[in-house]
Each structure stands twice: as C-alpha cells, then as structure tokens.
Image (tube, helix red, strand yellow):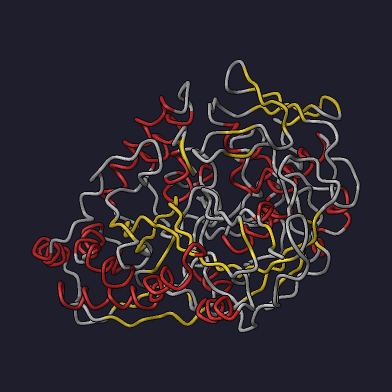
Amino acid sequence: MKLSKRRSALVAAGLSGALLLSACGGSDDSGSGSGSGGGEGGGTFSVYIGEPENPLVPGNTTESEGDQVVNSLWTGLVKYAEDGSVEYSGVAESIESEDNTTWTVTLKDGWTFHDGSPVNADSFVDAWNYTAFSPNAQGAASYLSRIAGYADLQAPVDAEGNATGEPAATEMSGLAVVDDLTFTVTLSSPFSNFPAVVGYNSFYPLPTAFFDDPEGFGTRPIGNGPFQASEDYVPGQGISLTRYEDYAGDDAAQADGVDYVVYADVNTAYTDVQAGNLDIVDVIPPDVIESAEAEFGDRFIATESSQITYLSFPTYDQRFSDPRVRQAFSMAVDRDAISEAIFQGTRVAADSFIPPVVDGYREGSCTYCTLDPDEANRLLDEAGFDRSQPVDLWFNAGAGHDAWMEAVGNQLRENIGVEYVLQGNLDFAEYLPLLESRGVAGPFRYGWSFDYPAADSYITPLFTTSSLAPAGSNYSFYTDPQVDQLVVEGDQAETPEAGLESYQAAEDIINEAMPMAPMFFTEIQSVTSENVSDVRLDLFQRIVTSEVTVNS
C-alpha cells in the first residue's frame, strides 16, 4: 500500500486521505517498453502500479493503485492547486451557497465523455445516487453521506452488518437537476468545506453507458479525463490508455498514451526502470533510496507527501482492546532510528495524527509517539498483557515494507519483551479485504493520504463511525461517540478554519485511545527512465500523467 489516498487537508484549507489507502504491490510482468513515438505531444510511456482492489469505477476506488488510473481517466468538478486550495479548473464553473447547506453547482458547457456523450447535471446526480445506494456496495459511498436523503439509500442491517431489507429510496432527496448545466445539493447539515470534498473520486460523473452495464464497465471504463481506455484492463497485467483528443480541460495530455503495468514486487519494477523497460516508479524500495539519487540524478524525484504511515491495532481483538496496550506498543518503537537505518532519513518520525502539510497540525500532539520503554512496560504490566505469546505483524507484500516492519518487531522484542511473527505474504488486492473483514489479530501496517483538501480527512474516515466514516477506511474499528460529535461540530463551523478546533479536540481523544499509532510522515522518492520528462507527483501522491512528455 502506498496510501495515499488518500488523501485531504487545509494547507490552505489544506491538503487531504484517501487514499486514499496506499498500496505498493503489483505483478511479475516487466514493463512494456517505452519511448515509442517522439517528442512533446507524442509517444507513450509506462507506469508501475500494484493490482487495484476493484474494477476501475470511481465510486468504488478508494486505494492508491486504482486511484492512479481513475484519475487519468476522469476529471471532477474541481481540482486542487499545489498548496491544496480548490481550483475551478475542472467541470464546475462554480459551487455556491448562502448558508453552507444548499449548494448550487453550475457546470461548464462542452465537456464530453470518451464515448462522445455530454457531461451534464444528470451525469453527476445519477452517479452520486448509484454510488450512495447501499446494494451497489460502492466503497466510496459514505463520502456522500452529508447529502440529505443519503440514509434512505442505506438498507437496514442486523448486528453483524448483514442487510435485512431494502433501502427506503433509490435517489437522495438532497439532489435536484435544474437544467443540463445546473444542479443543487442540499446537505443534511451545514458543511463549509463542501467544494473541496467534491474533487474526490466518489463525486465523479458517469456516462449513460455505465448504467447499461455497471459490472462490465470497470474493465474498459468511459470517463471524461485527459486519457481514455483503448483496451480492457487485464488483471495481473494492466491497461493501456490513449490521449482523448476532445478533452475539454486545460490540462490536455502531452503524450499519446500511458501504459499502466501491474507488478507483484516493486523491486522488479525498479530494475525495469534501470534497464529502460519501464518509465516511472512512483515509490521506490527503501533500500535503494540512497543509491538511487546518485544513479538517477535529476531523474530521482523527491516529493513532500500528505501520507502518514501507521502501525494500526485491531481494537476488536482481546489482546489489543485495552488502550494501555496500544499506547505501550507505540512507545516501544524508536521511529527516528528506523527512519535513519531503513529510510535514510526520508521518513520523519510522526508526532501527531495530522501531518505538517495540513493546516491544523500541532507539533507533539501525539503524546505516545515518543520512545519510552520504561513507561511502555509499566502500561503493559498494568493492563496484564500476556507477553508469552508472540504477536503477528501484518503488511502487504511486494511493496518494500518488510525491512521496517521487521525493525518494529525487533524493537518490540528488545524494549517490551514481546516476540513477533511477520505476516507479509498477501498482495495488496488480498490485504485490504482481510482488513475489512477483521481478519487480522495483530498490529498491521496502514498508510493514509488525504482524499480532499480538508483537515478532517485525517480524522473522519479513519476514526469515526456510522454514516460519518467512508466505508472501509476505519480498519481498526475504533469508535467513540464523542469523536463523532466533535467531527460534526467541526463540519458545521462557519468556515473550514473555524472547524479546526473541533477536529483537534477529536484528535486529542484519539491520541488517548491510540487505535492507530502514527509512525512516519512521508517523503516520496520516485525514479524515471531517460524516455520521459516533466514527471510530477501531486499532493495526493499521484503521477500527473497529463503533464508527462516522451523524449525523442
């Protein structure tokens, strides 16, 4: 996992998670070769990805691998500047409200999907209703939960979460089409940062063709972005995209096409870039960071990231149900030592649940993120933790997590006398479903980048419950009604800046509970072949494929 997503924040109202969940996995296939074609405005290039968790449908894409491809194929209502602020350079002409509750969305004319059909108000309203309708099981559905009527689209469930009936409605009452280029959105309560949220995947439009065949659509998706699918997505191999010549945005693709190539191991992808068989690896293995900078020169790219890497805990497991145990494990890890030994100092020891790139960060707000073996042992003794049984340490395979997770295990052994077993055999597409099903019984690696520019993107998806939390992101299964209430108060503040105090108060409660231990703030190291230029990663840790040029 590279986790991103996900990404959300306020550097200006910030950077945001989301997911996005970050993957870092892939297939054994080598790159397809690159540099076919020549010069700016032509040629194709290739990019490493891990296997996406789901077919390529925006409303069901909440992890980094699928997110990278989806965002070459789609353009949303808004985009984000390099400081995280909202830019109206997408499909929306404006998004306005007088009360932060009822919003009028006005679209630009002339946008089309890759099949030539128009992008209009129905394209958004129909897509949002489909995504929110719980029987459709879209992973990003809950990002729409602030819209009035969302609850009516959720099927009743029993204590185990199994549906016991049908939803009361198929369309949200808060959505209304005014005309082809205008629709209104009424929220269930005020939310001042709504224009920032709608840049996320679950708010992307869908063409009529999607509803004709939702299951098959994700194999060869039809978006409205700078690239279009020229062939089917093949699991374990990838997908080739070509430039969409009728793209209406101001960020048209410079290259003729991009090949997304799936690898099972990032080390294989890295050696293919060295050999010129692959053009871009967005996150290189930790053990090559030092040598890569010297080897690749100006083709080595370091990017400040919105990502936090966590050691997360299954709060549902009896051994980790006591907050004192989770606090102790966090204080048993020397983050600075791991950063220097494994990451050559390119990961910064995390000291809060909101990273420095986001407005709302407070230095040292994570009081259990500092190494303190004596206090860790005292807390374990107080909690009656059984040290005679080893703990499983979980992470996804092929993404370069082995070394630092082993270092964490060694420190647990040395500092609190707990043995460990590494569980890193699952690829990304298998790892996430295991987390979703409460399938791990020990600490696990998790990564998160903001999903949209708002500070709450580091709190709401990961630590809240019910309709507040985007489905599938709260993998620790932590819950606290006080945190939920503080997030609601932050959402309903008159401005995003005014809501920070409530989000920070929620962070303080989360700190004491420690369902996830922040480990590192991340700088991303990428490398490219000699075949490409103008390679940039955005705030969401995505390669901006429209800007890449292929060298002659």
Q: Nearer the viewer, residue 418 or 529?
A: 529
Establish if 298 lies above or below 153: below
From what the image shows, is residue 355 above or below residue 176?
below
Q: Nearer the viewer, residue 6 or 444?
A: 6
Residue 80 coordinates in the image, percent (x, y): 58, 39
- Residue 530, relative to residue 151: is it above or below? below
Residue 142 in view here = yes
Where on the picture, by quarter, is residue 186?
Answer: top right
Residue at 33% over, 83% down = 421
Query: For residue 239, which quarter of the picture?
Result: bottom right
**In which quadrant of the rendered view does residue 263 lie?**
bottom right
Give the position of the C terminus as an image quadrant.
bottom right
Q: Residue at x 34, y 56 (%)?
A: 515
Report the side of 83 relative to 502 (left or right). Answer: right
* Residue 395 visible in the current orientation: no
Image point (89%, 55%), residue name: 212
